[in-house]
Amino acid sequence: MIKGRVHSIETFGTVDGPGIRFIVFMQGCPLKCKYCHNRDTWDAKGGKEYTTDELITEVLKYSSYMKFSGGGLTVSGGEATLQPEFVAELFAKAKKNGIHTCLDTSGFVDIDKIDPILDNTDLVLLDLKHMIDDKAKDLTGVTIQKTLKLAKHLDERNIPVWIRHVLVPGITDDRENLEALGKFVSTLNNVDRLELLPYHTIGVHKWESMGIEYELKGVPDATPEDIKKASQVLKEFGVEVFNK
Ligand code: SF4
C-alpha cells in the first residue's frame, strides 16, 4: 500500500474549503514562497508516514460534523500534488465514503500527474501567486505558467475552483498584477469564489526557529483598505472578491 508523508493534521478546519473540514497538510513543496507560513513543510523527507486507510479511518470519525456543516476533507501542504498517487488513492476512498473532497494547490504540477486526483475532487483551491512571470519567479522560485495551464484545464473539466491570491503590500498589490489577475479570472467559467488573502507575518517565527532568514522582513501586513483597493481593480473586470 502507498504511504504518504504528512506534515500535520487539523480536525476542525474552517478556512480551507466549505464547512468544517478535516485537513491533511502534506509534507514537501517545490516552491519557495518568500511569505510561506509553513516553512517547515518544504523538506520532502520530513513529516510522518501514513497509509490512506489510516487517514480515512481518522477522517470518518468526524464525518457527522462534516456532513452537518457541508464540510469534508481538504488536502493541502506543502504541495499536495507532490505525492499524487497517495492523494489520488485518498480522495478515491473519501468519495467511496461520501466525503466531499477539496484539493489546495499552488498548481505547480503537470496535468497528467494531477488528473487521477481530479477524478475524485469536488473543489480545487488554486493559489495564483503572481500573474507577472518574472515577479512570480522572484516571489516563489517558479513560473506561474503551469498554474495558469491547470486553471484552464480545470475549467475544461468543469471542476469548481476557488481562486486565492495573497495580497502582499508592494509585491502583489500593483495594478499591473491585479489587472492581469482580473482579466485571466474573467475568462474562466468554473470560479465559484475569488479570495484575496491579506499578507500577514504570523508564520515568520517558523523561519526564525529554523535559523533561516525571512526575506520579507519589514513588509507590513495588508490592511482592510489594501484589500478594498485591490477588490475595486478586480471589479473592473467583472470579478467579485469574496469577503468573509
Ligand atoms: S506553495 Fe505553500 S507551502 Fe509551498 S512555499 Fe508556497 S506558501 Fe509555502
Image: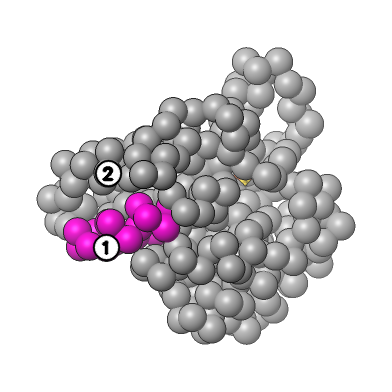
Question: Can residue 233 be seen?
Answer: no
Name the residue located 60 percent from the left edge and 21 percent from the top edge: 205
Residue 92 shown left or right of residue 184 in the figure: left
Q: Amino acid at mark 2?
A: Asp
Near mark 1 (Cα within 10 A), the count class, few <14, some 14-19 or many ≥20, is some
When asked about the image quadrant of residue 150, the answer is: bottom right
- Between 40 and 89, the one nearer to me in the picture: 89
Q: Which residues are magenta?
A: 87-102
Residue 186 vertical placement versus 38 (above, below): below
Q: Residue at x 28, y 56 (%)?
A: 93
- Reading the image, the residue beneath label 1 is 95
Magenta-drawn stretch contains 98: yes
* Depth order, front residue of 97/137: 97
Q: Which residue is mark 2?
A: 53
Quadrant of the drawing holding the N terminus: top left
- 105 versus 156 height, above or below: above
Tag 1, which secondary structure?
A: helix
Rendering coords of residue 162 (x, y %): 48, 65
From the viewer's perspective, is residue 114 above or below residue 85?
A: below
Which residue: 37% across, 66% down? 120
Residue 142, given in percent of the width and then of the height, sits at 77, 52
Q: Quadrant of residue 231?
A: bottom right
Q: Are marks 1 and 2 in contact (CB under 8 Å)?
A: no
Name the magenta segment's main secondary structure: helix
Residue 221 point in image, percent of width and height: 64, 39
Displayed-image quarter of ligand 1? top right
